[in-house]
Image (tube, rainbow, N blue to C red):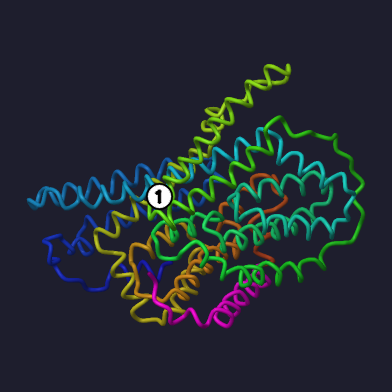
Amino acid sequence: MNKLLFLLLFLPVSSFAESGVLTSLTSHWVGYTALTLFVVAYILVMVEEFTCFRKSKPMILLAGLIWGLIGWKYASEGIEHAAEEALRHNFLEYTELFLFLLVAMTYIEAIRERNVFERLKVWLINKKFSFKQLFWLTGFLAFFISPFADNLTTALIMGAVVMSVGKGNAKFISVAFVNIVVAANAGGAFSPFGDITTLMVWQKGIVEFSEFFALFIPSLVNFLIPAFIMQFAIKNQAVKLDEKDTSIKHGGLLIVVLFVLTIITAVIFHNFFHLPPAMGMMTGLSYLFIAGFFIRRKSRKEGRDADFDIFESVSDAEWDTLLFFFGIIVSVGGLGFIGYLEMASVSIYGELSATSANVLIGLLSAIVDNIPVMFAVLTMEPNMSLGQWLLVTLTAGVGGSLLSIGSAAGVALMGQSRGVYTFVSHLKWMPVIALGYAGSILTHLWLNSSLLDVPIG
């Protein structure tokens, strides 16, 4: 990251763009200040686990400060509307992402409230699997659930299972959590719904919905290589634990079906109607509102619990994360408007091969969250083939597994485990995870070699 910042600061740039937009801000105190503020704010985000200072707070403030500096400079130069137009473009990008995620999070919260996830957890516990079987089962479930639910939600569900069955077995919990993080991130990499980065690439129209599934085998390799090695650290002991059975509340399975229909609606709107996927998701939200009305009415008639309220599910969505995305997108957009992303594109994609640059992007996402990294790449818009865009989608998605702080799944499980799964315990397995990272890249380059020369669009 230090090398990247060095390149950003000292590569030469022209003074003015053809449109009259200032580009000399990269070597102006406004540019230096904006970059410094970004680094400080992101440090606060990275240490959120220790400070309990929510990550959205510094990022929203940062967005305002960066664009305030830009607006002041442009106004003083008599260029009044260039910055405004650029910021409106950032708002549009965020709005599409916000509406899409809000619907997805609302469905996940509604499914959680109906005890669907709790029922899955109890079923797993009462099946009397051994620790090694649970290690593999939670890993595979994380891999296959995360393409539909996001990797954060998936990790928390599987983490709850591991915490319940592994009481008193800290080693099992630690290793199983590493496995869940790797599996959830890998599973999220081959689906537009599995990770924010894949969603952004899909919404941008760079990779079509069906084309993401070319990453299925590379993602599976990314999960299986470290899992196969880590399993030898777990003793094959039987789990002796019973959990009181839990039933799914009325309408729970219907909501799962409606969530699938909502995803299908979003795909149809994007692929066939050429409309933003967010419009399809908002249409799908109406399915949930209508179903909620009938669920409540039928519950009242049958004397069952009728407190199901869709607006409670909306309010339970991860608003800190949604607002954090606002800060990230608008702040990175500001740095791009200043000119830093163009400089980074020249230094990374201009001096390195596309493959080397995309591998580097994945490594960077282990330190810096993959969301700003991918948004920066999308803003740079390097001229790459479909195969290379799939590669950077893969590396940005699974690269975060190298460190526990590299993904939302890892950070969430560190909080859930209460000191059992830590940065250091994850770091111990980083060489093994790196083997999976390298294996997934080589598998993609071999299996999808025909896509490396296919232009996008």
Q: Position of residue 400 (x, y in %)?
A: 56, 62
Instruction: Give the side of residue 187 with respect to residue 366, left or right.
Output: right
Q: Amino acid at mark 1?
A: Ala
Q: Position of residue 172 (x, y in %)?
A: 80, 56
Task: Say if the magenta span includes residue 36.
Answer: no
For this rendering, which residue is in front, 441 or 342? 441
Provide the residue span drawn in magenta: 430-457
The residue identified by callout 1 is 41
Residue at screen point 40% across, 49% down? 41
Residue at screen point 49% across, 59% down? 198
Instruction: Give the side of residue 384 with respect to residue 17, left or right.
Output: right
Q: Secondary structure at mark 1?
A: helix
Graded by Cα atoms within 10 Å as few (under 14), some (14 to 19) or many (20 or more), the crowding at tag 1 reads many
Residue at screen point 26% across, 47% down? 88
Q: Is residue 46 above or below residue 356?
A: above
Q: Is residue 169 above or below residue 449?
A: above
